[in-house]
Image: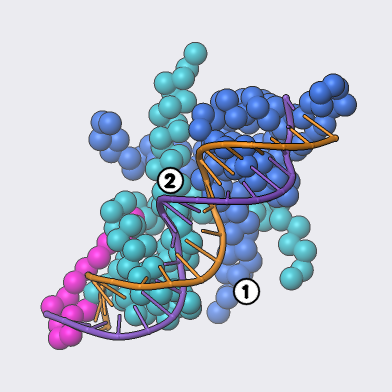
Chain colours: A cyan, B blue, C orange, D purple
DNA sequence: CAGGATCCAGCAAGATACTG
DNA sequence: CAGTATCTTGCTGGATCCTG
């Protein structure tokens, strides 16, 4: 049996699943594809996200090294969020989702 | 602006995201790639899933037409779950996740 | 501006008991 | 075997107030 290869594969997929875990991870990443943005800019772009939720999802993505956080010592402080190389390459996953979605979605109006 | 194309794209991705929503969707799909299985067979394969959770995730995937449910009028009744074509082709998404995961995961032991 | 801290509602999910 | 029904709990995420 090749259970070990299966295991490696599972771990890799699980790592990818972590990235889009939670209600806001995908919207945030999608927004960051447009370029780096600041905290409150993201809040406005994303519509209804709470301060807490945005903080948490950004910390989470930072931990996964998908998002980079840069602090500029202005007054008041400026913080910019952007995708890392790892994050930009995640686009391949989302594009594959798009292909699948476009092929199989009847998109019944609405 | 091509905001409309963005919108179409977003919808397609969202559709794909629905498939792996929840704690058990991916494990169940992964298990079904091995072939069609019955309810209690799935339960055993998946380890710690509860009856209720398995029921819910299967209904959910059935709704998305990713999983097919077949009933055989034996005594007692036999119910088999398998992936549809739509479900099998979802593998492309998971494989892309795998590629990304293998490229970017340091896999620090553990 | 960019959060931290706290409180709370709602849902996801597990445990258990029962049914055709 | 393949679920349904019910109870309960833990976590997700929103609302609100406060800070450097």
Separation (CA) of disc 2 from disc 1 = 28 Å
* Relative vertical location of residue D18 with respect to residue A24 in this rendering, above or below: below
- Residue A107, how many percent across, how many down? 73, 62
* Relative vertical location of residue B67 with respect to residue A60 in this rendering, above or below: above
Q: Is residue A5 left or right of residue A37?
A: right
Q: Nearer the viewer, residue D16 or B96?
A: D16
Q: Nearer the viewer, residue A16 or A24?
A: A24
The number of callouts visible is: 2
Q: Kindly identify the residue that appears in the image at 51 percent across and 33 percent down.
A: B48
Q: Which residue is mark 2?
A: A16
How many other residues sit within 10 Å of disc 2, few (<14), some (14-19) or many (≥20)? Answer: many
The question of residue A74 being in magenta is answered with yes
Are discs 2 and 1 less than 8 Å apart at CB?
A: no
The question of residue B74 being in magenta is answered with no
Q: Nearer the viewer, residue B41 or B12?
A: B41
How many other residues sit within 10 Å of disc 1, few (<14), some (14-19) or many (≥20)? Answer: few
Q: Quadrant of the N terminus of chain B?
A: bottom right
- Residue A67, how many percent across, how many down? 32, 60
One can see residue A5 in this view: yes
Q: Is residue A4 left or right of residue B7?
A: left
Dot 1: chain letter? B
Q: Secondary structure at mark 1?
A: helix
Q: Secondary structure at mark 2?
A: helix
* Relative vertical location of residue B71 with respect to residue A95 in this rendering, above or below: above
Q: Nearer the viewer, residue A81 or D13?
A: D13
Q: Which residue is mark 1?
A: B4
Span highlighted in magenta in the image: A66-78
Q: Quadrant of the C terminus of chain B?
A: top left
Q: Is residue B71 left or right of residue A19?
A: right
- Residue B105, how many percent across, how many down? 33, 40
Mark 2 or 1, which is nearer the eye? 2
């Amino acid at each position: 049996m090749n259970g070990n290869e299966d295991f490696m594969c599972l771990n890799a997929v699980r790592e990818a699943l972590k990235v889009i875990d939670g209600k806001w991870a995908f919207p945030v990443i999608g927004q960051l594809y447009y370029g780096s943005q600041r905290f409150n800019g993201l809040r406005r772009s994303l519509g209804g996200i709470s301060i807490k939720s945005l903080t948490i999802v950004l910390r989470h993505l930072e931990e996964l090294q998908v998002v980079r956080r840069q602090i500029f010592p202005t007054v008041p402080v400026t913080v910019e969020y952007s995708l890392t190389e790892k994050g930009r390459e995640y686009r391949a996953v989302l594009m594959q989702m798009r292909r699948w979605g476009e092929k199989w979605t009847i998109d019944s109006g609405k």
